[in-house]
Image (tube, rainbow, N blue to C red):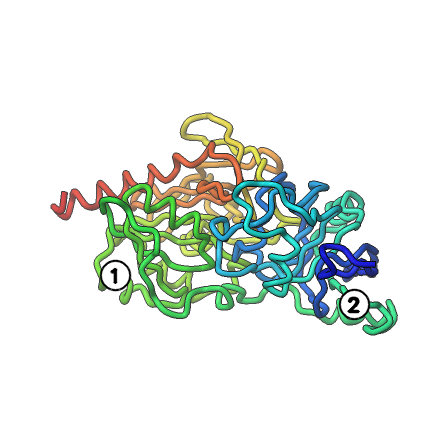
Amino acid sequence: MTRGGGLFPCSPGLLILADGTVFRGHVAVTGPPVFGEVVFNTALSGYQEIITDPSYAGQIVVMTYPHIGNYGCNSADNEAVSPAATGLVVREMTRKSSNHRAEEDLPSFLHRHGMPALDNIDTRRLTRHLRAAGAMTGGLFTRSPETEGTTRDLVQLVTAAPEIEGQDMVSKVTTPVAYLSPFQPDETRFRVHLLDLGVKRTILRRLALLGCTVTVWPAATPAEEILADEPDGIMLSNGPGDPAAVPYAVSCVQDLLGRVPVFGICLGHQILSLALGAETFKLPFGHHGANHPVMDHATGRIEVTSQNHGFSVSFADLANLRGETPFGRVERTHTNLNDNTLEGVRCLDIPAFGVQYHPEAGPGPHDAVHIFNRFLQLLSAAVSKTGRL
């Protein structure tokens, strides 16, 4: 028996977690065994943006919404050239899409990029297990278990796989050479240089819409090389993995602070915070979804945000949340109302700030897109001092 026009076999597939828990389902897209940190995402849509987001490098994504693939896939919604996630697990994958923008169905998209997937998995039970036990390494097996070995053998393969914590995942997704963003503004207001920790295309699009010409730089680029081109400001992008495993980016940001305006998103926010002297820690199961409520302390408003990160910034070592750092005073600007974790920081004596969520909304709500305007205000003030405006 086959499904999806015979491309994707209706055969047994396994997801095995490092604690030995086994989830049985059907193969949606076949491929070799893959290993990664198993995380769940609560977004109802935006599956293509999620699996192509470089922040998911090294992770197997579980979608909690039961029907995935309804509107198909198209080239415009890719956040990167190809999927960054290691594998995909869903309750039911739609084989026939229905949308005027669709160029292909989701199984065909995954098959073309060589990304294995399982469906008919009890994703509700899986999500509850991850919430209780925490995100952990897993193995996704889409071939007959008999060809891979016994379940005990497979569990041993999973437990032997490396964990994301402590790994430099940024080096696997950053650009190898600097390039000019393909999304150009109608009229250039500012020249922004972006440190590519795993940037999403939606961030580049958003900056272009706001009048920014963006040059994207490899994550290991020294600060002096970036500054030599005289940018108006610096963007620190999103990206995957453990921020503490990217000391070269932290060092670069320390050399940038106080010289040009700096704005960090997600991993960029974490790298900025490390540069300021804060610490980071691993969350039990991360924040992955498009419905996280965040309090903006500047306005008192609660904004629903899109999020994707497994680590968070601890502000405890910066006294009274307005503590002194080598770069002056820093304050908390945003708080996650689900677990009270830090969602934003701002420097009071130099032009620099960061947010943990994704204000570009790719995918997700647009409640927080206005945060880009704060960056533009810093750019405008800096450019006015130089006399260019």
Residue at image coords 32%, 46%: 208
Image quadrant of residue 155? bottom right
Q: Tell me the kind of residue under disc 2.
A: Arg
Residue at image coords 71%, 53%: 89
Q: Would you name the residue on which mark 2 appears?
A: 143
Q: Position of residue 222 (x, y in %)?
A: 33, 67
Q: Position of residue 29 (x, y in %)?
A: 70, 60
The kind of secondary structure element at disc 1 is helix
Q: In the picture provided, is 298 more to the left or to the right than 41?
A: left
Q: Position of residue 170 (x, y in %)?
A: 49, 64
Instruction: Establish if 210 lies above or below 150.
Output: above
Q: Quadrant of the N terminus?
A: bottom right
Q: Would you name the residue on which mark 1 appears?
A: 227
Image quadrant of residue 354? top left
Mark 1 or mark 2, earlier in chain: 2
> Pointer 1: residues within 10 angstroms few (<14), some, or many (20+)?
some
Residue 326 visible in the current orientation: yes
Q: Quadrant of the C terminus?
A: top left
Q: Nearer the viewer, residue 353 or 139?
A: 139
Residue 344 visible in the current orientation: no
Q: Nearer the viewer, residue 1 or 274?
A: 1
Q: In the picture provided, is 40 more to the left or to the right than 9?
A: left
Instruction: Establish if 14 lies above or below 376.
Output: below
Instruction: Establish if 261 lies above or below 18.
Output: above
Q: In the picture provided, is 230 more to the left or to the right than 262?
A: left
Q: Tell me the kind of residue under disc 1.
A: Leu
Q: Position of residue 315 (x, y in %)?
A: 50, 45
The residue sitting at the left extreme is: 387
